[in-house]
Image (spheres, rainbow, N blue to C red):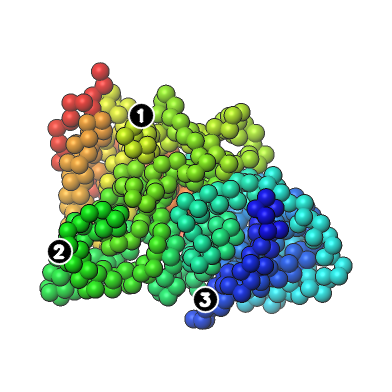
Amino acid sequence: MGAETDLQSIPALLARNAAKYGNRPAFREKEFGIWQTDTWAEVAEKVRDLGLGLINLGIAEGDFVAIIGRNRPSLYWSMIAVQSVGAIPVPLYQDANAEEMAYVLGHCGARFVIAGDQEQVDKVIEIQEGLHQFEHMIYLDPRGLRKYDHSRLHEFAHVLAQGRAAADEFSPELERRTAKLNFDSTCVMLYTSGTTGKPKGVVLSNRNIIMSSKASAEFDRLTHEDEVLAYLPMAWVGDFIFSIGQASWTGFCVNCPESADTMMTDLREIGPTYYFAPPRIFETQLTNVMIRMEDAGKFKQWLFAKFMDHAKKVGPAILDGKSVSGMDRLKYKLGEYLIYGPLKNTLGFSRVRVGYTAGEAIGPEIFEFYRSLGINLKQLYGQTEASVFITQQPDGEVRNDTVGVPSPGVEIRIADNGEVFYRSPGVFVEYLNNPDSTADTKDSEGWVATGDAGFIEKSSGHLRIIDRAKDVGKMASGAMFAPKYVENKLKFYPNILEAVVFGAGREYCTAFINIDLTAVGNWAERNNIAYASYQELAGHPQVLETIRQHVSEVNKSVAQDEMLSGCQIHRFLVLHKELDADDGEMTRTRKVRRRIVEEKFDDLIGALYDGSDEIFTKTEVTYEDGRKGAISATLKLLDAEVQPVAKGSMAA
């Protein structure tokens, strides 16, 4: 088992870790305010007991097992136990509604479900009549479930106990199934976010996950001494790679926070050395820092501004090991003592050695803010179909305008239309029961179409992503239209949470904007402005004027880009509701479903282009308990200051 050639499954890596790192922490979970730790040896024992318990329940090789709940060690162990019996784990988004859950469970034909708590159990019970293959559900937290019908419902602890009791009977079968696993065995199935339609089941093999985990861990020199915080959705491929793939390959410790509400406190207590967050998390943290500074005294504000200006000037250079004068280094060290160190400690980043962000473009100012503090924040570009990694930024080559060079083992080519293609050992096996989509995405030579438009810089070899290939178009003038480029610039402002830009085939661009309720709400409180709802605050004249200024500033920035200066926003409105996954306007990973937004709010788009000053609209919404309702509003349509279009932006 010690040879790398034998380590062709996650259960094999677990056995290696139990032997090599047996007494080292593998998983921690905070419960009732106390961190509970399980070593690799203890995890291996629990995974074995659960595997035996699953065989006792009748699980067969090739069965699909849905895993639903927040990040908990027991659910990660469940995924490994499911693999060990030759079945396939299918993690689901814990905030998925019953309808979304029904589609996934029905599509893969899951016979078993392992759920975190009563909320998830209730959702499955609600839809179980339509799930013809469903047989058994296992739950972790027994609270509220004592009086439920337990004919097909089993407590996690009881399944483990039954597995231990049946060890003599089922151990040979468990060992036979585990020994059969190899690189070609399915490791996990993860569903895409469904930006353009129904989610697709992405089948990933042990080769995909293990080779990607090995290459990426070696790229950033990750070891068994690293610590990560597992707080992102378990159904997302990044969490699977970090918390199962890389953790199993390196033997590092995975820490699970007590809840979403305590995440920031738990982050500070753990102080991870390896950290990932989407841009929205970094933006929110920076917004909170700025809000706190606005409430601080004048001297503190001055001190913060003074040292942050210095950090922006020399911090990234010091981080990259470049030449910086002795005086600047001394001043930076003083700033570390007074400002940067305490701030990193407050954010939970004191020990971060490698940090990544991906999923959307991060604002250059936000990116440089964290790097100026001495945090080694980098960007990567990836997809579920790639087992995450397509490109990464090497240390010393970190930039805010690229997504890095090809990850180890990855090849990249750019098609004539600008679309990015890649192939690697991480390329997915297939979309489950969808050969047509598989063939459309992956060709016979293993090249995968990303759906993104971009180019490789000749000077550096770095990849730059422009936009989704299907969203890049032409305006009526022939100028290039790339909405995400402008949307990301808008979202750099703390007051703006989301933006959707329109303009393909039209004379000029317009936009919908969502305000950030936390940032704008804090401004309202400091200025004694009363408001009763998001809708009321979003329509406040001062808020609208502030957003107008932001849009005008973005136009100045966009105008400087010859290729995209035609994408300046002429008119915009602030939506009366936040775009929401429950209303179908966003995916569970918070990507805008552009086509649905266009169809749902076509009256608002029409008003932006017909010269109207305001429009009355009524929109159906879904409440947290699943009930439907409607909200109505009269929205103001505003003009923004536009700069002269750069000459090079026009088509010949």
- Residue at mark 1 to residue at mark 2: CA–CA distance: 50 Å
| Rendered image: mark on residue 564 | none
Q: Nearer the viewer, mark 1 or mark 3?
A: 3
**In which image quadrant can residue 303 be found?**
bottom left
Residue type, mark 1 in image? Gly
Horizontal side of residue 69 vs 333, given as left or right: right
Q: Name which residue lies at 65% across and 57% down.
A: 10
**Mark 3 sits on what residue?**
30
| Rendered image: mark on residue 473 | 1
> Residue 514 appears at what percent x and percent y?
32, 52
- Residue at mark 2 to residue at mark 3: CA–CA distance: 44 Å
Report the residue that reaches farthest toward the top: 652
Above or below 438: residue 164: below
Q: Nearer the viewer, mark 2 or mark 3?
A: 2
Q: Are marks 1 and 2 in contact (CB under 8 Å)?
A: no
**Mark 2 sits on what residue?**
327
> Residue 576 appears at what percent x and percent y?
32, 53
Residue type, mark 3 in image? Lys
Q: Is residue 235 visible?
A: no
